[in-house]
């Protein structure tokens, strides 16, 4: 980090988390400067963060973006999202498997065309930043070219993207199937080319046990052992018919988690999307392995998959690491604000009321930890990448009216989680560059 050189200063109500507020209490977890400043280094990293009055002299002449009372937070991190589903939200499947067959698989077949994939990657990443999301763990398709297109587009934007080519060799249309050897070969090529290049990371990506043979799961496990600093990214225990299929096809397994476990796919770098229906045994195993279950609330309600039990997974005897994600296009919004709002409602239906700080922590530093990136992103410590989102708590008439009644920062955040969406995203910064600025609506 170049200590003196600064690109810009961003001013506003600056908020970030040092830790999980439900574990250590908001007092020591939350860093809040109502009149705050973040100095962005010329290297794209945070040079300084604190109360504006304390801004060191060397930053005082730097150009400033002053957002007044708007909130400045670390950019949102989406811990599970499908790039090739960027345009097929709101597809009315009767359940997960029907939705995959009738809507997801046909659309994903188009990514056999590199031209189509390249255009889609640009739209997809633009959409993320328009929603205040600056980093993500992303599913691609089975095609190597589609993952290439995504990595190349992310590199041009200097975004922290973790992605992988999807491995799937059965129970899917022929145009979406690879085979164990090809899956490994393509994954290796991509790992060698992209993993650790700039801000990019590779995740060994098995779609789910339904679409991989035992030979492919074994090959993926061997790959994970050979590249231990790559994450593993897959789906787990999302809905009942899916779980029944897995039980039928892998009769020797204790449960769905055990299928992945037997092939070496359950570890501290494993991201399991959904985990709506997990036995106590599975939770204990995931906990012991240090694995992550990624909560995808808008997807789980939209596809009728079930009500994720946030408290049980977080607080049980065998607490499991939790991430939070949109799961677009099973999910119905790119907005991590809407995702937090849905997580709140699902938790309420399970008898648990998450605090606003808990939700915002999950979507920032919590997800950074689960992606193994908390020394790079997720909070506003000097030296971390300057990925920021600026949120306007008065962005819409409804938010503005509610804001007049807000009592303190936790209440402001709560209203944003319940009522906010992309309209509340005033600006987004990636690696110190402002990549999105929302013009305030014109007066009528
Ligand atoms: N399980 C396997 N593939 C998918 C997918 O594309 N979306 C969701 N929500 N679940 C899956
Ligand atoms: Zn998914």
Image (cartoon, rainbow, N blue to C red):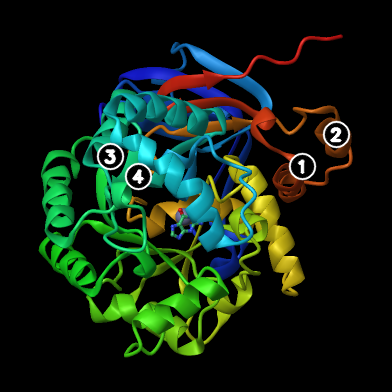
Mark 4 and mark 3 in contact? Answer it, CB < 8 Å.
Answer: yes
Q: Residue furthest front?
A: 174
Q: Can you identify the residue that label 4 sits on?
A: 140
Upstream in sequence: badge 2 or badge 1? 2
| Helix, strand or loop at mark 4 | loop
CB contact under 8 Å: marks 2 and 1: yes
Q: CA distance from mark 4 to mark 2?
A: 36 Å
Decide which of tag 1 and tag 4 comes sooner along the chain.
4
Between residue 241 and residue 75, name the one nearer to us: 241
Residue at horizontal 74 percent and vertical 49 percent from the top: 414
Q: Earlier in the sequence, mark 4 or mark 2?
A: 4
The first of marks 2 and 3 along the sequence is: 3
Residue 309: where, in percent of width, then height?
Answer: 62, 73
Disc 1 + disc 3, Cβ < 8 Å: no
The picture quadrant where one finds residue 118 is top left
Callout 4: CB less than 8 Å from ligand 1:
no
| Residue 279 seen from this side | yes
Q: Where is mark 2, residue-wise?
A: 398
Q: Where 59 falls versus 387 (above or below)?
A: above
Label 1: which residue? 419
Mark toward the viewer: 1 or 3: 3
Give SS at disc 3: helix
Label count reads 4
Instruction: Estimate how packed mark 4 is, as few (under 14), some (14 to 19) or many (20 or more) residues with alpha carbons within 10 Å.
Output: many
Location of the C terminus by quadrant is top right
The CA span between labels 2 and 1 is: 8 Å
- Relative to 253, is 264 on the left or the right? left
Q: In x, y percent, where is residue 335?
A: 60, 40
Q: Which mark is residue 147?
A: 3
């Amino acid at each position: 980090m170049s200590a003196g050189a600064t690109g810009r200063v961003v001013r506003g109500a600056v908020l970030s988390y040092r830790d999980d507020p439900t574990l250590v209490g908001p007092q020591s977890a939350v860093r809040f400067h109502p009149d705050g400043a973040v100095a962005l280094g010329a290297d794209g990293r945070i040079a300084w963060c604190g109360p504006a009055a304390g801004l060191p002299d060397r930053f005082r002449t730097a150009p400033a973006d002053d957002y007044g009372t708007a909130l400045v937070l670390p950019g949102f991190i989406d811990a599970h999202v499908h790039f090739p589903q960027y345009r097929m939200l709101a597809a009315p499947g009767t359940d997960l498997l029907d939705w995959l067959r009738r809507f997801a698989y046909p659309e994903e077949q188009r990514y056999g065309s590199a031209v189509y994939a390249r255009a889609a990657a640009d739209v997809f990443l633009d959409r993320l930043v328009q929603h205040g999301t600056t980093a993500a763990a992303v599913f691609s398709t089975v095609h190597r070219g589609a993952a290439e297109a995504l990595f190349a587009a992310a590199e041009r934007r200097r975004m922290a993207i973790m992605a992988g080519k999807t491995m799937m060799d059965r129970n899917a249309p022929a145009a979406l199937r690879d085979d164990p050897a090809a899956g490994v070969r393509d994954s290796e090529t991509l790992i060698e080319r992209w993993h650790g290049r700039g801000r990019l990371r590779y995740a060994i990506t098995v779609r789910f046990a339904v679409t991989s043979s035992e030979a492919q799961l074994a090959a993926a496990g061997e790959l994970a052992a050979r590249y231990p600093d790559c994450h593993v990214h897959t789906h787990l225990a999302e809905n009942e018919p899916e779980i029944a299929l897995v039980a039928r096809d892998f009769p020797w397994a204790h449960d769905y988690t055990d299928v992945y476990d037997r092939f070496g796919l359950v570890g501290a770098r494993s991201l399991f999307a959904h985990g709506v229906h997990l036995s106590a045994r599975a939770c204990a195993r995931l906990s012991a392995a240090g694995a992550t279950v990624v909560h995808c609330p808008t997807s789980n309600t939209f596809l009728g998959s079930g009500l994720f039990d946030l408290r049980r997974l977080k607080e049980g005897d065998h607490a499991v690491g939790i991430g939070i994600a949109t799961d677009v296009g099973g999910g119905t919004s790119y907005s991590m604000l809407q995702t937090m709002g849905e997580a709140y409602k699902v938790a309420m239906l399970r008898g648990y009321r998450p605090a606003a700080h808990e939700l915002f922590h999950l979507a920032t530093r919590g997800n950074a930890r689960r992606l193994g990136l908390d020394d790079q992103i997720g909070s506003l410590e000097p030296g971390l990448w300057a990925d920021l989102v600026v949120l306007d708590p008065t962005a819409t008439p409804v938010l503005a009216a509610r804001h007049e009644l807000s009592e303190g920062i936790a209440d402001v955040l709560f209203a944003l989680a319940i009522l906010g969406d992309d309209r509340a995203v005033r600006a987004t910064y990636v690696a110190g560059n402002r990549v999105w600025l929302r013009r305030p609506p014109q007066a009528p």
